[in-house]
Image: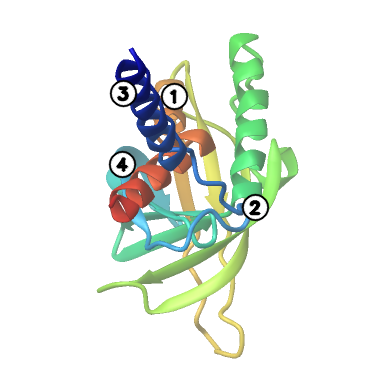
């Protein structure tokens, strides 16, 4: 009986030590830092986009998450340039709030068919745009604004416009004006892939694989 009790005690100790070793690691995180690991791919989306005065065309946009800065990097070829747009955590929240306003107006059939401008924007914010014909060779901090634009009758898309801005200290070099058009169903797909909780989960999976012993 005594030997049986000792055996059970040993099993319990092993289980407890195993559970303790698998306890979730507490990590320091903030709005500008998630983990010290490289950027990784989240997903690719097929969106209407335009550059300067060109008509919207469908292009592929790859989304990367940068855990070191808690930023999303959107990369795609628009017209003749490869474009990269950076959205911080704060600006992603801003976009979500703007989209909620757009969705309320859409559900109420209250989106006027007028030219979208900064004056009738749902929101405004700041971003970084990188661009170049063969790859990003220029970088500039610029402003963006959001509103809606009809691409077809009865189909107003949520629109993100990154304004043109001159490269500081360089004459005659300005970023192209970039517009992204997102339908309600596309927004759901983007939010499913790019919501903060999912991005953190993907980061933790990478950390778990790297730290497994």
Which residue corresponds to mark 2?
30
Report, in whole angstroms, how far the alpha carbon at label 2 lies from the one at label 4.
23 Å
Tell me the SS state at disc 4. strand
Residue 119 is marked as none
Closer to the camera, 204 or 146? 204
Sooner in the amino-acid sequence: mark 3 or mark 1: 3
Decide: few, some or many residues near mark 3? Use Cα within 10 Å; few <14, some 14-19, many ≥20.
few
Which residue corresponds to mark 4?
43
Closer to the camera, 154 or 146? 146
Residue at figure coordinates x 50%, y 59% from the top left:
177
**75 left or right of 114 in image:** left
Q: Given this view, does label 2 or label 4 mark the residue nearer the observer? A: 2
Tell me the SS state at disc 1. helix
Q: Given this view, does label 2 or label 1 mark the residue nearer the observer? A: 2
Report, in whole angstroms, how far the alpha carbon at label 3 lies from the one at label 2.
46 Å
Closer to the camera, 192 or 155? 192
Residue 174: % across, % down: 52, 75
Sooner in the amino-acid sequence: mark 2 or mark 1: 2
Residue 66 placement: quadrant: bottom left
Sooner in the amino-acid sequence: mark 1 or mark 4: 4
Residue at figure coordinates x 59%, y 25% from the top left:
113
Q: Are marks 2 and 4 in contact (CB under 8 Å)?
A: no
């Amino acid at each position: 009986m005594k030997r049986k009790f000792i055996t059970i005690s040993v099993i319990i100790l092993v289980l407890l030590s195993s559970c303790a070793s698998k306890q979730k690691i507490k990590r320091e995180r903030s709005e500008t830092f998630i983990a010290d690991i490289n950027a990784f791919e989240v997903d690719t989306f097929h969106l209407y986009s335009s550059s300067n005065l060109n008509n919207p065309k469908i292009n592929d946009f790859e989304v990367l998450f940068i855990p070191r800065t808690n930023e999303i990097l959107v990369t795609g070829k628009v017209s003749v340039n490869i474009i990269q747009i950076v959205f911080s955590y704060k600006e992603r929240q801003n976009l979500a709030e703007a989209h909620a306003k757009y969705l309320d107006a859409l559900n109420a059939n209250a989106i006027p068919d007028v030219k979208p401008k900064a004056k009738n924007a749902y929101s405004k914010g700041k971003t970084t745009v990188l661009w170049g014909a063969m790859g990003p060779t220029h970088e500039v901090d610029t402003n963006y604004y959001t509103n809606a634009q009809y691409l077809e009758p009865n189909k107003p898309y949520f629109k993100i416009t990154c304004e043109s801005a001159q490269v500081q200290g360089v004459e005659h070099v300005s970023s192209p004006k970039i517009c992204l058009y997102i339908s309600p169903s596309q927004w759901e797909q983007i939010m499913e892939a790019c919501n903060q909780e999912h991005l953190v989960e993907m980061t933790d999976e990478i950390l778990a694989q790297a730290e497994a012993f």
